[in-house]
Amino acid sequence: MLACELRLAGVDVVVAERLPEPTGESRAGGIHSRTLEVLDQRGIVERFLEIGELQPVGHFSALFLDFDESESRHPFPLMILQSAIERLLEERATELGVRIRRASEVTGVSQDETGVSVELNAGTPDAATLRARYLVGCDGGRSAVRKLAGIDFPGTAATMTSLIGDVELPDMTEDYIWVRRVEGGDYSAVAFEPGWYRVITSEYDLVDPDEVTTFEQLRDALIRLAGTDFGMTNPRWISRFNDTARQAAQYRQGRVLLAGDAAHIHFPAGGQGLNMGVQDAVNLGWKLASVVRGTAPESLLDTYHAERHPIGERVLHNTRAQAALARPGAQTDALRDVFSELMVFDDVNTKLRHMLNALDIRYPAEGGHELAGRRVFDADLKSSDGAECVYELLHGGRPVLLDLGAGGELAALARGWAGRVDFVEARSEDEVWPVPGVGEIPAPAAVLIRPDGHAAWAVSHGDAPDTAALRTALTTWFGPALEG
């Protein structure tokens, strides 16, 4: 996703991929609302919707949540396997001209004032060195880039072990088993496609350091918890995870940055990891591209850590809570009962839903408008460039100053950022915009939209635009105005 963002902005980018070919392993199983919006902002969401399945429910520690269809064009999670997500994003990257070097393992990193040298496959006949302006480690929880850059990865150790596998269960008589809690842990079996199931077993106060997971281990764990293996056979993929929670102390070390699991790992409750990684990439991509192209100062990269590190902290916090809420025992059973009773209240349900779907994120921004810093709603438009909704304006990955009736000096002011910020005049019949975390607000008269879909500045109808604050926002995010 990051490579796509950089290429969209005209930056030359290489993906150094350790694996010689895609594994085909299913791994993560879904995309949340905000990530679907991000894909919509780039005009590629239909590719994912065509092969995934929308689910009208989500969950917090296996306790079901209700979703609000008014908050987004994509209010529901999309069930789609990570292997399919990877394939679609690789196809998109190839279309954009991304160079992908497979069988290229990062074995050394050194940086200086002008760039980064990346050693690949040191000590082998395929050894090579790449020279680049910047390096971003998107290489997972055991990130070689993070370790080679000397970035600390503090956090909490595992207290349980989960095994996961895609298998056939010929003796299964139920359509699915949803997180059945028993003494010692829990288990589930959910059909992803006709004929095969995803089985997950979780055993608490059992920390197994064994990195190699076998079919027999999964079978034995299911028998311990369920009393049967349901005739388990024909494994397609077997793996393990736990509730280790760690976060990089800094997302940037000079010319080396981190995104996705390289920057944060946690218990996969609620399916937030893949989504947070994609959102990391979309936050970083346009900033890094602006710095590489020389249109913004290098200090812009510091806002990546400032904005995304707190989001990672929030996810680690709520997944620790979900892991605690899933522990077996009478005390936790009682806590879950109380928690379930609270979740029927709209405010509680909404708070938990937003923790998972990330629609309520707010970054620091100029001015006091309620929309500033928040993600922009995909309102219907009749615009000067033919776009029929807000997200169509973002397909090119460029910032947009959207005038919905403010008029005045906006067009003249925008000329100072010609070629960097698109100025669009439009009209909309949407009189109110839903703003998760706030509620419905009157549609703005104008809004400065960053390439990641967040508002950097906004003004309400009836208010005079604060052009000084707008100029500051334009300069902060997109560099100084052009001379003349």
Image (cartoon, rainbow, N blue to C red):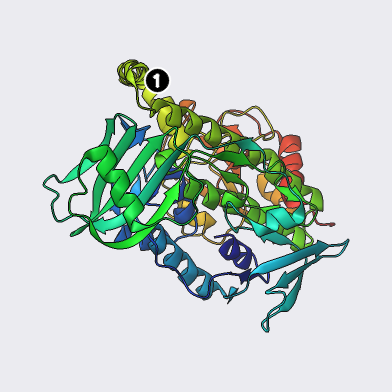
Name the quarter where the C terminus is drawn: bottom right
As shown in the figure, which amino acid type bears the numbered disc 1? Asp
Q: Residue furthest right?
A: 113
Judge from the rendering whether residue 312 lies leftward or rightward of residue 232; answer left or right: right
Determine the residue positioned at 75% across, 66% down: 108
The residue nearer to you, when weighing 419 against 206, is 206
Q: How many marks?
A: 1
Determine the residue positioned at 34% across, 33% down: 185
Q: Residue furthest left?
A: 173
The reply to whether residue 69 is in sight is no
Name the quarter where the N terminus is drawn: bottom right
- Where disc 1 sits, the SS reads helix
Above/below status of 340 relative to 354: above
Q: Position of residue 196 (x, y in %)?
A: 22, 58
Q: Position of residue 361 (x, y in %)?
A: 54, 35
The residue nearer to you, when weighing 48 against 19, is 19
Q: Position of residue 26 (x, y in %)?
A: 37, 59
Q: Which residue is labeled 1 in the image?
A: 347
Above/below status of 461 relative to 277: above
The answer to which image quadrant residue 201 occupies is: top left
Classify mark 1: residues with Cα within 10 Å, few (<14), some (14-19) or many (20+).
few
Q: Position of residue 469 (x, y in %)?
A: 73, 35
